[in-house]
Amino acid sequence: MSEIQFTEGPLLEATKKFPTVLWNDSSDLDELTQSISFGGVGATCNPQIAYTTLSKHPEIWNDRIRRIADDNPTWSESEIGWQAVKDMSVEAAKLLEPAFKATNGRNGRLSVQTDPRLHRSAKALADQAEEFHNLADNIVVKIPATKTGIEAIEDAAERGVSINVTVSFSVPQAVEAAAAIERGLEKRKAAGHDVSQMGPVVTIMVGRLDDWMKHVVARDNIFLDYSALEWAGIAAVKKAYGIFQERGYTARMLVAAFRNPYQWAEFQGGDLVVSPPFKWQQIVNNSDYVAEERMSKPVDEHYIEQLRRIPDFNRAYDVDGMTVDEFSSFGPAAKTLRQFLDADNALDNLVRDIILPAP
């Protein structure tokens, strides 16, 4: 990281002014290197991101995938693809080691997502989380905020895994996941283990919640001020952030799945992680925006009143809006889980086309 030249702009300036930290929503090495120059101190990988990176760089990954297949002649396409994901993650994690050491594990982490095909088994998720945790010192592992995932989150945290909660779109999901992490950490401490270098985060995928609100409004013919629909995810994050602060949870919040510039600007000043896709980092850093503290500023009450007309917003915004049993069937959760499963299939197909090309 010492060789990376920092790039002046709104992103780097914000990282200097506020405790808000920047992570890159990709483990593509070129993008991550540039993000670090913007002040980035973390990154993520999942089947969808891995598929995109492998497809984008066939000159690098096609031969490597063939080599993995040759070295493991009995492996399935899935096993080969996931080995490529793990290799990619370890290489990206190396770029983040300086930030990891400088912050005692709070930052400098590379997120690796558990296989979405394991979403029905808490033990399988926790076991894989532990496996990924052991890939590098600075790995943080994504587990979904479903009923099964909450059980796995507590188990994995107790085993010493730093968790990044994913498939999370709502205040009740975020709060329940943070509480599960806290229970796991307390059990680990009670067993005599040090947890000071663990760096758990709880994600709310702001743009995907906005997407769902727009879908519901169109589906159910709900009349409201359409501009309010850009604020649903922001409102959920600010509500959950206040609860995290009040309850003293160890986990920080992480904001992902950006759709508009407010979803970066509105969180500046908070002690949380913003993880925009690289293209959004470029948009922000090429602008003349001057970052200001906005985390403490509530969402305009007009927008909240308008959003309250949508039943699913109330479910996402109120801390008791959903039970744990309802998490996986909540619209954006079900949709995102299916997309992640589809990405797994796409990764399998990509590997198949490389090792067994069509005649």
Image (tube, rainbow, N blue to C red):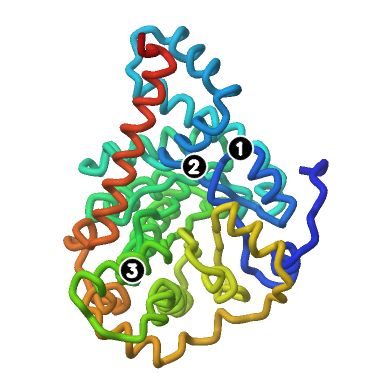
- Residue 170's label in the rendered image is 3
Q: Is disc 2 placed on a helix, strand or loop?
A: strand
Residue type marked 1: Ala
Q: Looking at the image, which is closer to me, 86 or 247?
A: 86
Disc 1: which residue:
92
Residue type marked 2: Cys
Please name the residue shown 47% across and 73% down the image. Answer: 248
Q: Are marks 1 and 3 in contact (CB under 8 Å)?
A: no
Q: Is disc 1 placed on a helix, strand or loop?
A: helix
From the viewer's perspective, is 170 left or right of 196? Answer: left
Q: Are marks 2 and 1 in contact (CB under 8 Å)?
A: yes
The mark that comes first in sequence, 1 or 3, is: 1
Q: Label 3: how many residues lie within 10 Å, few (<14), some (14-19) or many (20+)?
A: many
Q: Quadrant of the C terminus?
A: top left
Please name the residue shown 32% across and 17% down the image. Answer: 76
Query: Residue 215: image x %, image y %?
Result: 27, 67
Can residue 247 be seen here? The reply is no
Please name the residue shown 71% across and 57% down the image. Answer: 39
Cα–Cα gap, marks 2 and 1: 9 Å
The mark that comes first in sequence, 2 or 1, is: 2
User: For the image shown, how many numbered marks are present on the structure?
Assistant: 3
Q: Label 2: how many residues lie within 10 Å, few (<14), some (14-19) or many (20+)?
A: many
Query: Residue 18: image x %, image y %?
Result: 68, 72
Disc 2: which residue:
45
